[in-house]
Image (cartoon, rainbow, N blue to C red):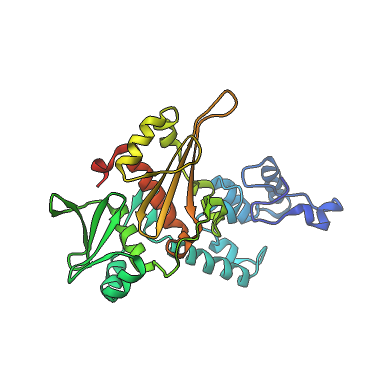
């Protein structure tokens, strides 16, 4: 590959085309080792960016390194201008802020989310989110087949059980409830069912953020009856798609569609998870992924083990 660790694509460089200069290659490539050896011989030291990428096992700084853009690049004088690096840093900071609280497998609930909710008008939130008020405590959200009280006084969430409210220790559900109440907009359902890669933020759902259906396939790939039982226990409504499919309503304006395709001699079993296109009016990409992970876990483990 002719793209160097720093991101320069040597295939479009006239110096390489003319044979004047060779590519550095990705950080762990044979070209990188050869380039560093030549640099040490001619210059007394290898390029600090290439050497760092090789040492850290990074193929390309911009794509693979969590420290990008680092001081080695900022100190220059090449390959990038300070303006370009500042733009990268600004956008990466915005992206990380967008994902605040969401780390797959580990969720934290930022206190400022509760604070923002405390400051909101109860009636306005209820109207936009299609939830019930419970003054002065907060709001009752119908979540799948349960009622969840979002108590802004205690800053906790509770599940209705036998006429009383029981504390729920589930940071993912807590964060999703807060995000929904804070961000639910006036948009109604579009009726257009789409997959994650059809959303405006499709780029997010690739690599480490890919929609994970492995646990669903392991549990229900060859057990449509079991899938139907679990889906109906969560309040899912059967729909005519695939070999077995259900519509879930984790939040009043956010339906999810789970479709099981049974395998045959040519294809393995598969699950499709679809959304109403309007979901992006209420949830950002990280929250959509968190919601799918939660509902999938509930399907595999049952509500009683998760809430």
Q: Residue at x 31, y 67 (%)?
A: 113
Q: Looking at the image, which residue is at 28% across and 49% down?
A: 145
Q: Position of residue 71 (x, y in %)?
A: 54, 63
User: Which of the 4 quarters of the picture holds residue 287?
Assistant: bottom left
Q: Say if 230 sits above or below 119 in the image.
A: above
Give me the residue at 49% from left, 48% from top.
274
Residue found at x 51% / y 63%? 92
Q: Position of residue 111 (x, y in %)?
A: 28, 66
**Tag count:** 0
Q: Position of residue 91 (x, y in %)?
A: 53, 67
Pick the front one: 148 or 118:
148
Q: Is residue 125 left or right of residue 34?
A: left
The residue lying toward the viewer, choosing from 195 and 91, is: 195
Up-down relation of residue 5 to residue 156 (above or below): above
Percent coordinates x, y for residue 116 in the rendering: 31, 72
Query: Quadrant location of residue 127?
Result: bottom left
Q: Nearer the viewer, residue 161 or 243?
A: 243
Q: Nearer the viewer, residue 167 or 33?
A: 167
Q: Is residue 111 left or right of residue 19?
A: left
Residue placed furthest toward the right:
18
Identify the image quadrant of the N terminus: top right
Residue at the front extreme? 240
């Amino acid at each position: 590959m002719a793209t160097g660790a720093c991101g320069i694509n040597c295939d479009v460089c006239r110096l390489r085309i003319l044979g004047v200069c060779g590519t550095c290659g990705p950080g762990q490539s044979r070209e990188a080792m050869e380039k560093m050896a030549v640099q040490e011989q001619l210059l007394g030291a290898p390029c600090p960016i290439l050497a760092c990428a090789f040492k850290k096992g990074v193929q390309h700084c911009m794509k693979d390194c969590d420290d990008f853009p680092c001081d080695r690049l900022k100190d220059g004088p090449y390959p990038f201008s300070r303006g370009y690096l500042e733009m990268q840093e600004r956008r990466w900071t915005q992206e990380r802020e967008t994902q605040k609280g969401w780390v797959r497998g580990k969720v934290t609930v930022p206190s400022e989310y509760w604070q923002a909710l405390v400051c909101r008008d109860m009636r306005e939130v209820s109207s936009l989110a299609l939830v019930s008020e419970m003054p002065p405590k907060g709001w009752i959200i119908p979540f799948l087949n349960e009622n969840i009280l979002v108590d802004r006084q205690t800053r906790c969430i509770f599940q209705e059980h036998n006429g009383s409210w029981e504390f729920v220790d589930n940071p993912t559900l807590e964060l999703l409830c807060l995000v929904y109440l804070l961000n639910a907009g006036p948009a109604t359902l579009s009726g257009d069912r789409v997959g994650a890669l059809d959303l405006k933020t499709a780029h997010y759902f690739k690599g480490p953020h890919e929609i994970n259906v492995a646990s669903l396939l392991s549990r229900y790939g060859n057990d449509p009856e079991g899938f139907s039982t679990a889906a109906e226990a969560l309040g899912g409504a059967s729909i005519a798609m695939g070999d077995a499919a259900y519509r879930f309503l984790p939040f009043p304006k956010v339906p999810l569609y789970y479709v099981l395709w049974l395998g045959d001699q040519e294809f393995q079993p598969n699950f499709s998870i679809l959304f109403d296109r309007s979901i992006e009016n209420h949830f950002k990409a990280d929250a959509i992924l968190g919601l799918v992970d939660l509902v999938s876990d509930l399907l595999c483990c049952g509500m009683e083990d998760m809430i």
